[in-house]
Amino acid sequence: MVNGSAAAADGTPGPVVRVPVSLRVNGAERRIEVDTRTSLLDALRDALGLTGTKKGCDQGQCGACTVHLDGKRVLSCLTLAASADGRDVRTIEGLERDDGAPHPMQEAFARHDALQCGYCTPGQIMSAVALIEEGRAGSDDEVREFMSGNLCRCGAYPHIVDAIRDVATGGRRA
Amino acid sequence: MRSFAYVRAGTVEEAVAAAAADPEAAYLAGGTTQVDLMRDEVFRPARLVDITRLPLRGVERRDDGGGVLVVGALTTMEELAAHGDVTTRLPLVREALLRGASPQLRHMATVGGNLLQRTRCRYYRDPSTACNKRAPGTGCAALDGHHRMHAVLGTSPHCIATHPSDLAVALLALDAAVRVHGPDGERAVPLGEFYRTPGSTPHVENALTHGELITHLEIPLLPPEARSGYLKVRDRASYEFALASVAAALVVDEDGRIRSARLALGGVGTVPWRVPRAEELLRGARPDDDVLRAAAEAALSGAEGRPDNAFKIGLGRRAVVRMLGALARGEEPDGAARGEGR
Ligand SMILES: Cc1cc2nc3c(=O)[nH]c(=O)nc-3n(C[C@H](O)[C@H](O)[C@H](O)COP(=O)(O)OP(=O)(O)OC[C@H]3O[C@@H](n4cnc5c(N)ncnc54)[C@H](O)[C@@H]3O)c2cc1C
Ligand code: FES
Ligand code: FES
């Protein structure tokens, strides 16, 4: 049993409780100590300096904070860092190839102009990479359904679908 | 957010003991409700008992009766939806799961947590407003406020908040049960006895007492010849809660008569809403328009609308007719994309 020390019991904000957390982030072991309230999103951005993962709503509604946890796409804003202890995290920074070349999905987003302001893009790309691994990019409708957890305030949706289908079909989409 | 102590439990007994020892403790599963509501200061636990590492993940099939799926409470929504028996024998459960939330949320959200998610009522989620469910005795701001998404069945003058779970609606139609481990031992609670309508105590939502942990769901399989589905009517095509939803299963005999019927509604009730009277009307009948309309009438009987949500009564009736009619004809109710993986 892992135990973070006790907080004040009277309903006031109480003393900060800190817990050690070790994560495997983009292949590297990282050890940090966090306030129990810290989300995985804030741990990545503030403690580990990985600011590619974005905070849109902080309420589980927009998908900007999407990362892969033990290989599955999840929302880092609703994941507590303490609860992710011992797990494997992949962020947008971990997508590039060993030689520094971008991931095919990143290339496809650039090629299809699948963004405007770019704020939602890291979350879109992490979700899209997982979507392909899940085998759910078989048609435009399927992509729309299974990308519905990623909102884009700029409305880049048509090009996002094009980019994902391009990768799913092995580059046969103009 | 109030600061809290964090405990990660390794066994069910450890988890229950840790929660039972502290009246201000709460369990953490996928966190998609728990963390969200803590951030909004709706929940202010002094201690979180993390149950994500308990060995309660996975699905087993028990072959008593017509077969029962015993589902560990920490199985995620995606995992349950992908299970072979759910795909072949329980389309209504699969569809209820895959039409809920988003893929990211479904990879996090556990089926136990899903049954315990809280209402999406904006007043419940905003501690600066009146809400009897969140703060007993403060009143209900929804009665005369924004209540387009609110319930028309099972309401009281104290609360009209809708129960948001899709999964619970499908499971209720199937006579599923939850297995619970608490400080005083284990018990099973049929889903039909699990949820509480608000009455004068809207803050009491279900049969669980403090420290009780859901360990498993027990889901009876439908007979192989049954047709079932989940119709979810909502403001956008995906990633949205139901305005009205219908979980239904029919067995239709060769002579065209309905041998058995199961029907439950979501999005319209303060709790997932089963309708035994409508099921009786359908049993033994031919599914013609009059019969389906009578069942729909029965399903919404007693419904009370307010200015902005009264439309749900007609919407609910039409959804019932559409779902039952489609099942009787062996069609899809909503022309769902094949990609949804029926
Ligand atoms: C943007 C958004 C959209 C959503 N859309 C839908 C939708 O369309 N349909 C739908 O059905 N749901 C929807 N949800 C809700 C989501 O499905 C639930 O939040 C989720 O299923 C809860 O599971 P969890 O594992 O994350 O639970 P947690 O958030 O960890 O826990 C939920 C509650 O249950 C308690 N708890 C958890 N597990 C147990 C257990 N085993 N025993 C006892 N207590 C326990 C916790 O203490 C907490 O009070 C949506 C959520 C979000 C954020
Ligand atoms: S920041 Fe996590 S879903 Fe919006
Ligand atoms: S590109 Fe601006 S939000 Fe999507």
Image (cartoon, coloured by chain):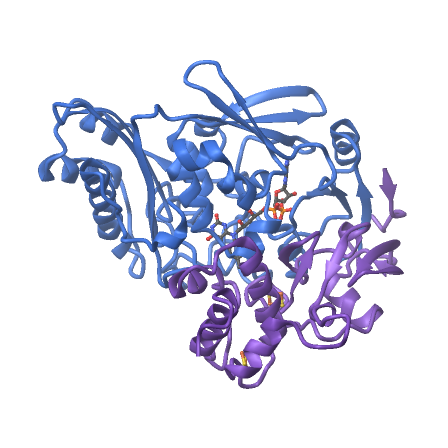
Chain colours: A purple, B blue
Q: Quadrant of residue B26?
A: top right
Quadrant location, ligand no. 3: bottom right
Q: Residue furthest top?
A: B64
- Coordinates of residue B177 in the picture (x, y in percent): 50, 26
Q: Nearer the viewer, residue A93 or A18?
A: A93
Residue at figure coordinates x 71%, y 42% from the top left: B52
From the top left corner, tell me how far across and down residue B71 is, in percent: 56, 30
Residue B180 as seen in the image, left or right of residue A45 = left
Residue A119 at x, y = what percent? 60, 79
Q: Tell which of A129 and A41 is nearer to you.
A: A129
Image spot of residue A6 (x, y percent): 88, 47
Of residues B111 and B293, the one nearer the viewer is B111
Above or below: residue B134 compared with residue B1: above
Which residue is rendered at x = 52% and y = 69% of the image? Answer: A167
A128 sits left or right of B158 in the view: right
| Residue B135 visible in rendering | no
Say above or below: B187 vs B172: above
